[in-house]
Amino acid sequence: MKLPAASLTIKITVLIVIVLIVGFGISTILTIQRESDLLVEQSKGAARRLTMTLIASIESAMLQERPDITRGLIQEMQSTTPVEGLTIYRHNGVEAFTDLETLKAVSKEAELPKGVAASIEKMARPAGAVMTGPLFKKAVDTLQTQESLEEQNGVLLFTLHQPIPNQERCQGCHGTDHKVRAVVRVQTSMAPVFAAVHAQRNRQIMVGIVTIIVAGGALALVMRSVVVRPIQSLALAAKRIGEGDFAVRVPADSGDEMAELGGALNDMTVRLATAKQDLETRNAELAS
């Protein structure tokens, strides 16, 4: 069974919708990608700023010979900052600011203010697992920040390893046999970021769908008025001319190609009417 041919209005509407889908689709994809990259970079930037703030606080407290303040600050930040992990490691991978090894080494070279050692001893705890990861080693070897995105327990984490150089002013307590005094390791979950990305993506898709529907409907109505109706008028006029009605005329005052076509059809109708009248006159003369 042959399906009925689709009307010109439907064909034009479908074409408009396809063009809008392609155009808005590409635009939406690019916008989503750009905003996703921006949100991810903002999250990474927050982790970098947190790390640099912590390093500045450590440097300040250590130069004032107050490592106890540094330990307290780190413990507080570990429990209050919205990050998944915040750990400082010595250049050999052992967790810093936990045991009393550094305190013992420093005490041999310098005398700490009264009460500092006692305060540090109260905060002492066993060190965590030794850090041996490739990014940690690379940070120690190159003195450059190392960053990565890695998944742990189904959660995507942004991990940053920021080395702290063993500056000359620090070597009196920390020795001169290593270039890196410590590495700050910060891990922050990217789940909230990607949740925001997905929400933004859904909003963009909804805006695109609504825009396509509204714009497609409006353009279809305009095309129906500007193109389809004039063509229908021409088709109806041509049908009446075929039936012998040479008095029919179509509007030809729009100033566009449809007007030219209408004018040509009107001229043809006039010539057909004249030819018919001449033929009838000759037939009448022959009959008489």
Image (cartoon, rainbow, N blue to C red):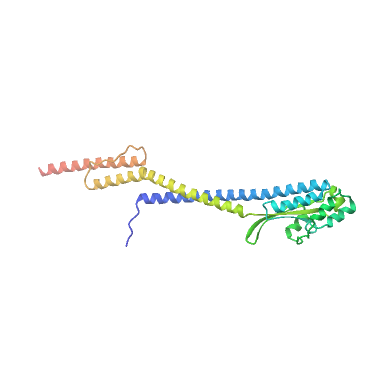
In front of the other: 278 or 217: 217
Measured from the top left, where is residue 120 in percent x and y? 81, 53
Name above or below for residue 133 compared with residue 8. Answer: below
Residue at screen point 80% across, 55% down = 122
Horizontal side, residue 268 vs residue 222: left or right: left
Residue at screen point 75% across, 57% down = 138
Measured from the top left, where is residue 5 in percent x and y? 34, 55
Name above or below for residue 223 compared with residue 184. Answer: above
Query: Where, quadrant-wise, is the C terminus in this rendering?
Result: top left
Which residue ends up furthest to the left in the rendered image? 288
Horizontal side, residue 144 vs residue 173: left or right: left
Measured from the top left, where is residue 118 in percent x and y? 84, 53
Measured from the top left, where is residue 179 in percent x and y? 82, 53
Horizontal side, residue 25 vs residue 47: left or right: left
Residue at screen point 70% across, 48% down = 50
Residue at screen point 73% across, 60% down = 134
